[in-house]
Image: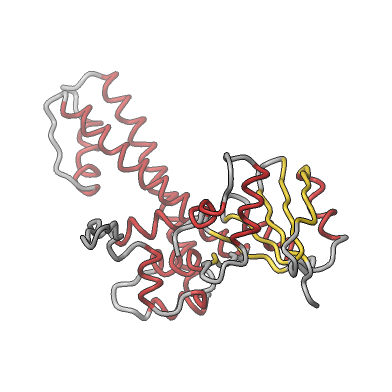
Amino acid sequence: MEQSIRCGVDIAKLVFQIHGVNAKSGETSMVKKLARGEMLRFYANKPPMLIGIEACGGAHYWARELTKLGHTVKLMTPQYVAPYRRGGKNDANDAEAICEALTRPNMRFVAVKSESQQAVLVMHRMRDQWVRERTSLMNQIRSYLHEFGIVINQGRAALAKTLPLVAESETLPLLFRQSIADLADRLTDLETRITALNKRIESWSKQDSTAKALLEVCGVGSVTASAAVATAGDVSVFKNGRQFAAWLGLVPRQNSSGGKHSSEPLPNVATVICEHCWCKAPEQ
């Protein structure tokens, strides 16, 4: 069915701003502010539209729900929408800018993630937080032991060997040993949680066909494969592998002017994938 209206939606937690125009004439036909609970009821009674949304928190959920109602939804990176905003930044101007950017011939869109992909990304965010917390906790324990003249080599293995000796040492104050024991219990709990999460991620990677294919690549494990599949979504939006690498940030970002070329240094691959493994909108 021909879509007679194209619509830009500026989403938020509670209030959404809508700006719709006639697809043929380009004249404004709809300017409306909706509460969150009215969103789906409003679009359920509308003919199929082309709807644009900035790829931000909650965007993938609304894209899926509006698609179920028969609409065509496209997500756009916020930095690509900003040049089309006129006047100051507010909800109404943002919605109008989204509507305008929606039909630009060179606009690049973000693939809508499925619920399964977002669930995998939740696991990766949890894992990333716990790994950071584990590292912070290990450094905290090392610094406390250093104050008592105990220096430990880097690595979890060295710390694991030292902690039982500290607990049994009678030369150290009892209060100190009790405090270290509490920290060691917390560290053990984090290790257990991370191990269980790694197994969950590995199990999913072996069940997903795309992730299984990535596991065949030398140097790619279950964590990298699952993060890549869940982050990229529909890889058909990339014309080639270089576009995908650039989207992830694995090539230098240019900042050139006046014929002089400059670029930022290449980031660590694992860091890049981790930073992009959520539903925020990385540059495509």
Q: Residue at x 58, y 47 (%)?
A: 86
Q: Residue at x 68, y 44 (%)?
A: 92
Q: Residue at x 27, y 19 (%)?
A: 174
Q: Is residue 119 left or right of residue 247?
A: right
Percent x, y of residue 160: 25, 44
Relative height, residue 80 to residue 149 (above, below): below
| Quadrant (top left, top right, bottom left, bottom right) of the N terminus | bottom right
- Can the viewer see residue 171? yes
- From this viewpoint, which residue is outermost toward the right? 45
What colour scheme governs how the chains and residues are painted in the rendered image of this protein? secondary structure
Percent x, y of residue 235: 49, 75
Q: Residue at x 22, y 27 (%)?
A: 144
Relative height, residue 90 to residue 252 (above, below): above
- Can the viewer see residue 122? no
Q: Is residue 46 left or right of residue 118?
A: right
Q: Nearer the viewer, residue 124 or 7?
A: 7
| Quadrant (top left, top right, bottom left, bottom right) of the C terminus | bottom left
